[in-house]
Image (cartoon, helix red, strand yellow):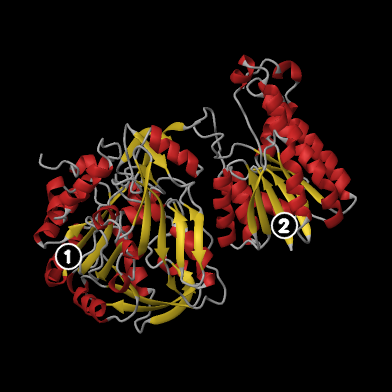
Amino acid sequence: MSTWIILGATSSMARAFAREMAETGAAVLVAGRDMDDLRALATDLDARGAAAAAALYFDAGDPATFAPIVKVLGATEGKVSAAVFVGWMPSQAEIDANPSLIDQVGAVNYTGPARFLHELAPLIEERGGTVVGVTSVAGDRGRFSNYVYGSAKAGFATYLSGLRNRLNRSGAHVVTVKPGFVDTSMTWGVEGMFLVAAPSAVAKSIAKAVEKKKNVIYTPGFWWIIMTIIKLVPERIFKKLSF
Amino acid sequence: MLWKETDYAGWARVHKARGNVARPERSTQLTRLMEEAPAPAYGMLRSYNDSPLNDGGAAIDMTRMDKILHFDPETGVLEVEAGVQLGDLIRLFAPKGWVPAVVPGTGFPTVGGAIAHDIHGKNHHVLGSFGQHVLSVTLLQPGGKRVEVTAESDAALFRATMGGIGQTGVIVSAKLQMIPTPGNGMTVKETRVGSFDEFLALLDGSDYRYNVGWIDSTATGSALGRGIFEEAELSGGPDKAGGAPALPVPINLPGFALSAPTVKTFNALYWRKVPARGRTHVMSIAQHVFPLDKLHDWYRLYGKRGFHQFQCVVPLQNASVLKEIVQKIARSGLASPLAVIKRMGEGRAGMLSFPMEGYTLAIDFPARDKAETLIKALEAMTVEAEGRLYLGKDALASGDQIKGMYPEWEAWAAQAAKADPDGVLITDIVRRLQLREIGK
């Protein structure tokens, strides 16, 4: 049997991915902070075909919550896989007014998930499995409108790249996912959104990337073209742009 | 962001709205919304008219509240959040031997919408309406009060909620009794029908649990009311699940796409697709009951102005009026290829439920001035035949016409006033038909 742990499972993208995994018949553990919602989600996954489903408490900003989850996973049998969907994007204006938010943005988007994966990595090396790390196109280049969030996601992406290198030695795999604009609560009502993708479509593309052992995917795929262009803009021009 | 200012519309695109919409992802968010800023709810916006709209006001999009809360594989009792889509329930539970007792002609509507309009399907003559299979419904009323209602705990509130167009509280979840199925298939028998009278005889005599007729609404003279009669039973699945993949209609089509000559030609060809001796085949449940779901955004076939779906039901003894209606439509040359006829049973679960024992006809018209004049005439004929129009579809009837068809409307309005004294759940359809204005 194979077990998935989904971190940040109350988000719509994570919920859709958890359902994809449940329908393959895997055991799915969902982790986050809203335990009522997570328990309801576990029942939902169970009805959709998961071999087993349960809710666990996880707070990316509180490393004390990590070890108990790793312990639960240690007690399962078969492959162990993890998908990290946690993310938090306060506006750049909020951060400018209160720079201490940078610590929290770093903890939720980068250091928390990285530390969790580091604690879990030996188990994955032993049993095999897949890590899905959801970063963001915002991490590809620091932009005027959200470079603190972007830099944390960039840090996490670099971590995932190294973790892929490490886990590859034991046959385990890491998929880095860079979503563009997805129709989640994070983008609901935000100005300037375009080509917004449905969470269910993004979840399907992640499931496919896991199956095909892709290393890095943009989802929807056309974001690869957009980000390639954005990365090619010379810095002397880029620094004058404001988007 | 909690609120998004956005444009949205009824499925037929005749009614549109603009306003602030919240889309809760979790139960705690929905509860907080109903405490602090209560608003009417909508689901997949598959009602044809202004039933899900609140133009200029606020609304709650329930599509993300879509969890399965409990499933008992022994009894087929299912508890779900209101945003779950009926097609998903078939996909998930038919392989386990259960399907929702009642589904409409599309799989996209949510359970909340199905309750709010007490929908019916191809098995209405046997199993009645959706609400008759609701064991309990949980409402979240303005102020955040959560009530679980059954037909026994509060009969009046339950009957005001089934088909009650969302006015007794936001429907957050429901417990449904599903029906057993041998598998994810349907065995479908198709018969060519030559005339209106032959159609009625076949509808009266059918002993299948699912049946519906497609009518060629352009045929006149002796061919008036000809069509194809489909009778079906749940069965094991087809050898290969299949059928064509889903296709979008990417743009609004120009007006001539559904002009009279095109429709007449299409209908004549469609009628002949079934051989004169009839045929029987096995397909997946969704393929049979949701024929149009493979064509995403099909409202675009009718162009920018949208369309009307006229649906009436008339009592059995007034079938002659229905024949006159079909005749009037055929002569007008305004109809689209989408026209269905069915015999309904008595089953209805609420005070504003559409069904009555009789024959129902549903037909689409591109939204044009001439078509609207025709529909108004058809509505007057429905009134004369002591029939009913459907609150999930009708866009043109007057408040007095509708109230005359629903003699319990005042009892319903009293329940709505009790649940929502400040009228924060009032939607465009309620305003248009003045449904909550008692004694005015």
**Residue at the spot 65% in from the left edge and 63% down from the top edge:** A51
Vertical placement of B29 versus B138: above or below?
above
**Residue at the spot 11% in from the left edge and 63% down from the top edge:** B385
In the picture as drawn, the residue positioned furthest to the right comes out as A169
Host chain of mark 1: B
Residue A80 in the figure: left or right of residue B428: right
Q: Is disc 1 placed on a helix, strand or loop? A: strand
Host chain of mark 2: A
Residue A70 picture location, percent across and down: 77, 48
The dot on residue B314 is 1
Task: For the N terminus of chain A, give its image quadrant.
Answer: bottom right
**Residue at the spot 17% in from the left edge and 51% down from the top edge:** B411
Judged by depth in the image, the label closer to the viewer, 1 or 2, is 2
How many neighbours does mark 1 have within 10 angstroms: few (below 14), some (14-19), or many (20 or more)? many
Q: Is disc 2 placed on a helix, strand or loop? A: strand
Residue B365 picture location, percent across and down: 27, 53
The dot on residue B196 is none
**Residue at the spot 48% in from the left edge and 62% down from the top edge:** B89
What amino acid type is highlighted by mark number 1? Val
Residue B13 in the figure: left or right of residue A106: left
What amino acid type is highlighted by mark number 2? Thr
Between B87 and A128, the residue placed more toward the observer is: A128
User: How many numbered discs sit on the rendered protein?
Assistant: 2
Vertical placement of A241 versus A49: above or below?
above
Task: Please indicate, yes or no, whether residue B24 appears anywhere in the rendered image.
Answer: no
The residue at which mark 2 appears reads as A3
Vertical placement of A7 versus A189: above or below?
below
